[in-house]
Image (cartoon, rainbow, N blue to C red):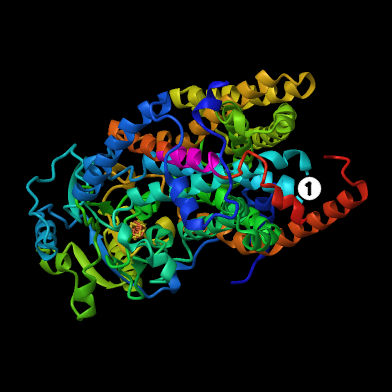
Amino acid sequence: MKMSNMIYPIAKDNDGKSIWKFLVGEFKPKGKLLTPFNIISLPIMLLGLVLIIIRFWKGIGSITNLTQEVPWGLWIGFDVVTGVAFAGGAYVLTFMVYILNMHKYHSIIRITVLNGFLAYVFYAGALLLDLGRPWNVINPIIGNNFGTSSVLFLVAWHFLLYMIAQLIEFSPTIAEWLGAKRARKILSGMTIATVIFGITLSTLHQSGLGALYLMAKDKIHPLWYSEFIPIMFFISSIFAGLSMVIFEGTISQKVFFNQISEKNHRTHDDILHGLSKICSVAMFAYFFLKVIVFIHGKHWQYINTSMGYWYLLEILGFVLLPMLLFFSSYRTRNIFMIKLASIITILGIIINRLNVTVIGFRWDVDIRYVPSWMEFVVTLTVIFTELWIFRWVVNRMPVLRESPSWVNEEK
Amino acid sequence: MGLDRRSFLKALGFAGATIAIGKSFGAPQMKESDIEFYGILYDSYRCGGCQSCEIACAEAHGLPKPIDEPKIGVQRKTDETRRVVVNSYKTSKGEVYIRKQCMHCNEPACAAACLTQAMHKTKEGPVIWRGSKCMGCRYCMVSCPFDIPKFEYYSANPKIQKCDMCYDRIMKGGIPICVEICPAEAIIFGKRKDLIKEARKRILENPTVYVDEIYGEHEAGGTGFLYLTPNPINELGFSTSIQKSSYPELSKGFLFSVPTVFVLLPPILLGIYEATRNNQLKEGDENE
Ligand code: SF4
Ligand code: SF4
């Protein structure tokens, strides 16, 4: 753990220097280049770049296995629908910290918002790769016919607005980094308004991602289709997001060890414990809803099929089990168990979102869609690029470390 | 857009305030008889499977000439190179041919799905695709219950291919090319209302020839393309899961709930914020 101290020198905010000189310095790489993460990620990113070029040159079919029956595959099902659920931590935490005034969680709010923001930017970027005619992407924005009856129209707009909201929520951090005192004051004054706006948008587009599939009623396996998909997507985004915060926080604690103050290190377990409580309650609501939908849908006849077993595994192994783990950590405060539960939950969300969007989608056709290896490489490229930017920001801006001293003096 | 009780309830349920589960959320029936759309009536009994329509369609739209023929047991599907296909089925009443193409739904899922209205239900009836607006997201393909829009996966400037009922020709006062070319007069073009009347008449006059059902009269809330067949539809390769009400109804509840959430949620959040802020002032830094 002490290693990281040597790899990344502690960053400094700009105090008094000219912004331009400061920026030039900040854009230079810091730390060692040959870390295991870089050695793995760089070649994949380069390969991904080549694949993306081929895709724009020869068409989407040249690197994907999409079919006429299954027009949305891994890039939508995983990059977008699953990724955005994981970015849900940002709206849940801003709700807890800014609306409910739960101060305990203040120390992780910046990193969570940054994570959410980057996730959205990159998943929106991944969406562009999937568009056949991406140059027309501005049409629904500039109003070259508004398809207001389209759920996708809503989702697109909410994405866009939410990205802006998150950028504003994060902007005081940038201002502190640049030493822009006046700007910081103005920007942090906007926080509550943007937080309220952001939570509203999140509620709608988290469920909107599920609502996208409402019209595909005949195409999704009956065990996963219900008119309550939007509500289920919404509820599951709460514990998906928080599980990601737990998981990601655990890693950040190690990787960015030297950035985090002594006090915040000590309170971290307390934060995880609090989050696990919320997860367990949200998962209970979700599980309950799943059971009701199942009983009402009269789906018993599907249980004794391979899809039925898969369904049971998802519900029992990846919802009920982690829920119980979260619950039991309630009393025992077993931090390891919380981390384990969060990992199982994350896997469960991946399975669930893929079941709706890919695995259970047109499960009846002769030629099933199986993503090509190139689709996986592009997906990894998107994720790695995001992590690179994430690391760059955390190593420079006061995301995990304390704000510069002038911030408190001003109050 | 008034907010009726149903959608309001649904919005509440959606907002998490109440979760009411029941069949009361079924979509209301659309009065499709009110609509004066143009449509096409296909009489499968008269169709000889000659593929004249396929060939004429391909020529008219710059697509490759079909090379395979309808064969029993082989499901030919429309794809990015053909907008209409004729298939052959072996039934108790002998060999029956069935054409497949876009159904030109009265309330099309594809058009409701499209966020740029590139897929568009014209007021004349045909559902058309407009390339200058389309961003190639393929949501229309995900949503169409008949699996009709097809995408050019191997093009850098891909198009969505599907039958547009020869909209250009109709606008110039003509009729679709397949209707014009059909040597057996198996397809006729006209006002949807008149086509249904004509179909009824044929069923009435030849009850032994046709089943008493016009496919497309109610399917998916009514379609502009109508089928008259000698056999029940499930013997002829049609999906049996198509619902009778329109598909856009399925997402209407969600769409209605959006303005409600936008109106209700922010003040609630603001209220909680004010309440907890006062708390904090009283308690001081206790919870730090
Ligand atoms: S059949 Fe499909 S493509 Fe044709 S109008 Fe209906 S929903 Fe649209
Ligand atoms: S692919 Fe084109 S026509 Fe289809 S929904 Fe997307 S924008 Fe509309």
Can you identify the residue that label 1 sits on? A101
Closer to us: A277 or A282: A277
Q: Is residue B50 left or right of residue A186?
A: left
Q: Looking at the picture, does residue A359 appear above or below residue A194?
A: above
Name the spot of residue B268 as percent of width and height, x first.
76, 58
Expressed as whole percent of the image width and height from the top left, the position of residue B83 reads 20, 56
- The verdict on label 1 being within 8 Å of ligand 2 is no
* Depth order, front residue of A369/A367: A369
- Relative placement, left or right, of B201 versus A23 is left
- Residue A138 belongs to the span the image colors magenta: no
Q: Residue furthest front?
A: A17
Q: Is residue B232 visible?
A: no
Q: Quadrant of ligand 2?
A: bottom left
Check disc 1 and give the amino acid type. Asn
Q: Which residues are the magenta region? A: A385-396
Q: Residue at image x 45%, y 73%?
A: B34
Quarter of the image that includes the C terminus of chain B: top right
Residue B140, percent across and down?
A: 36, 55
Q: Residues within 10 Å of mark 1 (few under 14, many from 20)?
A: many
**Can residue A391 be found in the magenta stretch?**
yes
- Residue A166 is left or right of residue B127, and the answer is right
Question: Which chain does the numbered disc 1 sit on?
Answer: A
Q: Nearer the viewer, residue A363 or A122?
A: A122
When asked about the image quadrant of residue A195, the answer is: bottom right
> How many labels sit on residues?
1
> Foreground residue, A218 or A379?
A379
Label 1, secondary structure: give it.
loop
